């Protein structure tokens, strides 16, 4: 008769919300693990006899108990609540924007980041694609659930996912960097110097540090918080009652600014923050005081906004499939139709406006003055439609390749996972590094006492911790 052990780890106010089930049936041990309320992943092993099977199972159970897992009843705890952003999108009546290329991701797309070399897009199916600025697909990742957003922190790229995790996309495979408390219905995420800010359905804001440990949480006067922007001085939080700035260390309110309509999206520049609202406005606010310095009027609800460097030009996308451009003083310069749905998110770079839309597109719009003027006259460039049917997903995983000490390449850095005050920490053990500093390291591959090879180790912007980047292998 099969023997089953079911364990859960669900931290109050913290991040973990996981289960671990071990079934011993004769000489076979079946282990299933994952997020509570989800199907999870399964591994099966066969042993020489029943005694060895039981011993192997007990060893695995012991490891999990030492990490804080405890016996539980399956089904009592539920899967985290999920709200996916929805827009009732209609076709724009404006002239068509000069779209250079459009990539079909296959599902409504929310996440976007445009870096120096590549553009990233994430959609509701958990697909994350990378493309060159000219529209050539260069990679595809697979996450277990829909992508909330894609954010950059220095040169690290993270994807927030509907499964309550934030994945580091800096290596060959996606790995878990943060886990968010099970009772938080996540709306939006942002990261600055390792500090994660999470805004939620109830108007709450929570911050988590680089070790994935809870810092503070506040409840705003509003709800449906679709904006969070993290910075050195704190967090800028947009909700149904406006924008609130909270101090970085304490979470105490610094200022609050009312907005005309509910905040549906936010953007920030070095000295200002921008909030798009349900009443068709984009508010421009001073980061230091919250004072409004300009206001931009659109013809419908604003679901996305962005700026050129330093805010010289302000862009917005409404739920009527239109995009806008304004001068800094509030003058509307142009309004054009996307031709591919309403923009969930956007980013401007080098005279191009990149948008991700309700029909699942990542579109690249030529926002140069000459191209816009031509489009207003009905003259459009030849647009290219791009697909990625042949690209296979590189799935998120907790599996780690193992290597022997003799196979350590020159220049690789060795880190070690140790137990400290009930938590698993990672420190660099290679020469030339401060061994007291913690290393931001994937959560779901940590094993007490294990050593790992890391391609790169970088000092954080604050200098308080290290960050692992690139390929990770376990050292035997």
Image (cartoon, helix red, strand yellow):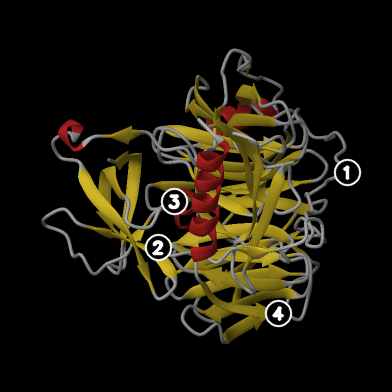
Look at mark 4 in the image and give the residue it sits on: 219
Mark 1 neighbour density, 10 Å: few (under 14) some (14–19) many (20 or more):
few
Reading the chain from its start, which is encountered first: label 2 or label 4? 2
Residue 69 seen from this side: yes
**Which numbered disc, 3 or 2, marks the residue closer to the eye?**
3
**Which numbered disc, 1 or 4, marks the residue closer to the eye?**
4
**Which numbered disc, 3 or 1, marks the residue closer to the eye?**
3
Mark 4 neighbour density, 10 Å: few (under 14) some (14–19) many (20 or more):
few
Q: Where is residue 282 in the image (x, y as percent from the top left)?
A: 69, 60
Name the quadrant of the N terminus. Answer: top right
Secondary structure of the residue carrying numbered label 1: loop
Residue drawn at 40 percent across, 32 percent down: 117
Reading the chain from its start, which is encountered first: label 1 or label 2? 1
Q: Alpha-carbon distance for marks 2 and 4? A: 23 Å
Reading the chain from its start, which is encountered first: label 3 or label 1? 1
Residue drawn at 52 percent across, 38 percent down: 397
The answer to whether marks 2 and 4 mark residues whose Cβ atoms lie closer than 8 Å is no
**Which numbered disc, 4 or 3, marks the residue closer to the eye?**
3
Residue 274 seen from this side: no
**Left of 104 or right of it: where is 473?**
left
Residue drawn at 49 percent across, 75 percent down: 234
Reading the chain from its start, which is encountered first: label 4 or label 3? 4
Look at mark 1 in the image and give the residue it sits on: 88
The answer to whether marks 1 and 2 mark residues whose Cβ atoms lie closer than 8 Å is no
Q: Alpha-carbon distance for marks 1 and 2? A: 36 Å
Look at mark 3 in the image and give the residue it sits on: 442
Q: Identify whether 169 is placed above or below 288.
A: above
Secondary structure of the residue carrying numbered label 4: strand
* Quadrant of residue 210 within the rendered picture: bottom left
Q: Identify whether 100 is placed above or below 430.
A: above
Q: Which circle marks residue 193 in the picture?
A: 2
């Amino acid at each position: 008769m099969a023997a089953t052990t079911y364990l859960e780890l669900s931290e109050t106010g913290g991040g973990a919300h996981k289960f671990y089930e071990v079934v011993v049936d004769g000489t076979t041990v079946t282990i299933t693990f994952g997020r509570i309320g989800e199907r999870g992943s399964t591994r099966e092993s066969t042993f020489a006899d029943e005694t060895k099977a039981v011993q192997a199972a007990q060893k695995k159970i012991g490891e999990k108990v030492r990490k804080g897992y405890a016996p539980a009843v399956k089904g009592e705890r539920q899967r985290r609540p999920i709200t996916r952003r929805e827009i009732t999108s209609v076709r724009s009546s404006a002239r068509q924007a000069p779209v250079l290329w459009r990539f079909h991701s296959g599902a409504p797309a929310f996440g976007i980041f445009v870096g120096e070399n590549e553009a990233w897009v994430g959609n509701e199916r958990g697909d994350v694609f990378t493309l060159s600025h000219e529209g050539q697909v260069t990679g595809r990742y697979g996450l277990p659930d829909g992508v909330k957003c894609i954010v950059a922190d220095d040169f690290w790229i993270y994807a927030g996912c509907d499964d309550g995790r934030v994945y580091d996309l800096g290596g060959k495979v996606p790995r878990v960097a943060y886990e968010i408390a099970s009772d938080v219905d996540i709306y939006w995420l942002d990261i600055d110097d390792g500090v994660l800010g999470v805004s939620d359905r109830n108007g709450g804001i929570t911050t988590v540090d680089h070790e994935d440990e809870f810092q503070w949480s506040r409840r705003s006067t509003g709800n449906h918080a679709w904006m969070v922007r993290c910075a050195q001085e704190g967090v800028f939080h947009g909700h149904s009652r406006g924008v609130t700035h909270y101090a970085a260390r304490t979470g105490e309110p610094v200022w609050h600014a009312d907005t005309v309509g509910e905040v549906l999206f936010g953007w920030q520049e070095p000295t200002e923050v921008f909030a798009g609202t349900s009443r068709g406005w984009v508010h421009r606010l001073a980061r230091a005081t919250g004072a409004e310095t300009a206001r931009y009027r659109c013809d419908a609800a604003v679901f996305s906004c962005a700026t050129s460097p330093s805010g010289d030009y302000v862009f917005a996308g409404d739920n009527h499939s239109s995009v806008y451009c304004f001068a800094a003083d509030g003058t509307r310069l142009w309004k054009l139709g996307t031709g591919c749905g309403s923009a969930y998110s956007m980013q401007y770079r080098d005279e191009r406006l990149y948008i991700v839309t309700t029909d699942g597109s990542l579109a690249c719009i030529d926002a140069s003055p000459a191209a816009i003027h031509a489009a207003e006259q009905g003259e459009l460039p030849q647009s290219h439609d791009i697909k990625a049917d042949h690209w296979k997903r590189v799935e998120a995983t907790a599996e780690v390749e193992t290597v022997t000490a003799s196979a350590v390449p020159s220049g690789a850095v060795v880190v070690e996972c140790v137990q400290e005050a009930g938590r698993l920490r990672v420190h660099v053990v290679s020469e030339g590094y401060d061994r007291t500093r913690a290393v931001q390291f994937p959560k779901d591959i940590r094993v007490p006492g294990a050593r790992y090879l890391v391609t790169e180790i970088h000092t954080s912007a604050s200098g308080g911790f290290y960050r692992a980047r690139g390929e990770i292998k376990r050292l035997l």
